[in-house]
Image (cartoon, rainbow, N blue to C red):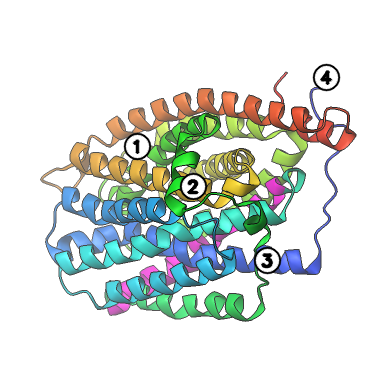
Amino acid sequence: MNSTKPTKAPKPSFTGYEVFVIAILAFLQFTVILDFMVMSPLGAILMPKLKITPSQFGWAVSVYAFSACISGLLAAGFADKFDRKKLLIFFYVGFLIGTALCAIATTYHLLLAARIVTGLFGGVIGSVGMAIITDLFSIERRGRVMGFVQMAFGVSQVLGLPIGLVLANRFGWHAPFWMIAGVGLIPGIIIALYMKPVTAHLKLQHDRNPFEHLGKTIANSNYILAFLATTLLATGGFMLMPFGSAFSIHNLGLTQEDLPVLYGISGLFSFIFGPLAGFLSDKLGKYKVFVGGTLMTMIIVAIYTNLGVTPLAMVITINVIMFAGIMARMVSSTAMISAIPEPKDRGAFMSINSSVQQLSGGLAAALAGMVIAEGPDKKLLHYSTLGIIVMASMAGCMILMFFINRQVSHKFAKAAPAAEPAKEMAEAFVIE
C-alpha cells in the first residue's frame, strides 16, 4: 500500500431515514448518558444529604455498572435472535422505570436498589443501539455516524446537567431523575411508532440456542483483544467522573452555582468535537485520531488532577480541552471496535463488550472511592493518584488499539483485496 491515507474523504451519503435513525438514537443515548452522568454533579449534594462517605458514593455509582454488566451477559445470547427494535424498546422501558424509582428513593439503600434496576436495563441499551448502527451503516461512514450519536454526550452537558443541577438546587436531588424519566418518554414513543424493524441479522443466525451463541462469541479469539481494550477504555471516565463535582467545589474552589456553567460550556464544545472527531476518523484514520485524542487527554489529566484553587475560566478551558481529547477517543475507538464482529455475532458481541465496559468501569469507580479520602476541610485527598492510574491505563490502551487497528485493516483487505472501495476502507485504518 503506497499511500498513508485515503486519497479522498468518504462522501456523506445518508438517506432521510438514516438521518432519522441517527437522530433518534442520539436522542435516546442522551437520556441514558444523562442518567448516568447526573450522579457525578449530584455527589456534592448527595454525600451530605444522605450522610454518606466518598466510598459509599463510589458504590452508588458502581452498582449501576455492575448490574449493567450482569444484564449485558444475560442478554448477549438473545441479542441476535430478536428484532433489534423490539429489544431496544423492552430495555428502554425498564430503564425509564428504574429512573423513576431513583426519583422516589428516600434513603441511601433505596437509591442503591433503584440504581441496580436502572443499570439492569440501561446498560444494554447502548449495545443494542451500536448493533443497529453497525447493521445499517458501512464502515467508511461509521466514524461520522458515531460522531453524531456521541453528540448526545455534549447535549447532556449543555442542556441536561445544567438543568438537572438547577432543579436539584431548587427542588432537591430527586428532581433530575423526574426530568430524565419525563423527557425519556419522547424517544421511546418515536422509536415504537416510526423505526423500522431491524431483522437482517436473523437470517445469518444458526446457533441452536442462546447459550450456545453466547459461548461461541465469548470463545472467539478474534474478539478477545477488543474486550481487553474496552476494559482499559472504561477505566479513565469511571475513575475521575464520579468525584468531579466534589473535586471542583472542595479543591478547585468553585461553587455549586458554578457547576451548571462549567458543564454547560464544556458540553457546548462537544457539539463541535463529536462530528469533527467522526469526520477526521473517516478521513485521516481511526487510530491516528485515537492516539492524538489520548495524548491530549493524558496531558490534561496530569494538569487537572494536581490543581489547587483555580479561577472558573481556567477550569472551563481545561475541561474544554479534555472534552476534545475524550470525544476523539470515544468516537474513533467505537468505530474501530464496531468493525470487529461478524454480522451474525454483532448483537452478542456488543452486549458482551458493554458488560466488560460496565464491569471494569464499576470496579474503577469502586477503586476510586477507596483511593479518595476526605480531609478535615472537605478537600478530596489523593486525586492526583487517580490521575496517574488513569494515564497508565490510557497508555496501555493505545498499545491494544494499535493491534485492533491492524486486525480491522487486515479484515477488510482480506475480504476484497482487488476492490478499490475495500482498499480505501483498509487505508483509513492502516498506520504507516
Front in this rendered view, residue 5 or 425:
425
Give the mark, 4 or 1, whose residue is nearer the N terminus: 4
Write down the region rendered in magenta: 142-171
Distance from disc 3 to disc 2, alpha carbons, whole Å, reads 28 Å
Q: Mark on residue 1?
A: 4
Q: Mark on residue 307?
A: 1
Residue 38 position in % (x across, y down) = 37, 62
Label 2 SS: helix
Distance from disc 1 to disc 3, alpha carbons, whole Å, reads 42 Å
Distance from disc 4 to disc 1, alpha carbons, whole Å, reads 46 Å
Q: Amino acid at mark 1?
A: Leu
The residue labelled by disc 2 is: 213
Looking at the image, residue 39 sits to the left or right of residue 162; the answer is left
Give the mark, 3 or 2, whose residue is nearer the N terminus: 3
The residue labelled by disc 3 is: 21
Residue 411 position in % (x across, y down) = 70, 30
Q: Nearer the viewer, mark 2 or mark 1?
A: 2
Q: Is residue 164 magenta?
A: yes
Q: Nearer the viewer, mark 1 or mark 3?
A: 3
Q: Amino acid at mark 4?
A: Met
Give the mark, 1 or 3, whose residue is nearer the N terminus: 3
Q: Is residue 97 above or below residue 247?
A: below
Q: Nearer the viewer, mark 4 or mark 2?
A: 2
Q: Is residue 33 magenta?
A: no
Label 3 SS: helix
Task: Count residues near mark 4 (Cα–Cα under 10 Å), then give few for <14, some for 14-19, many for 20+.
Answer: few
User: What is the magenta segment's predominant secondary structure?
Assistant: helix
Q: Is residue 171 above or below residue 129?
A: below
Label 1 SS: loop
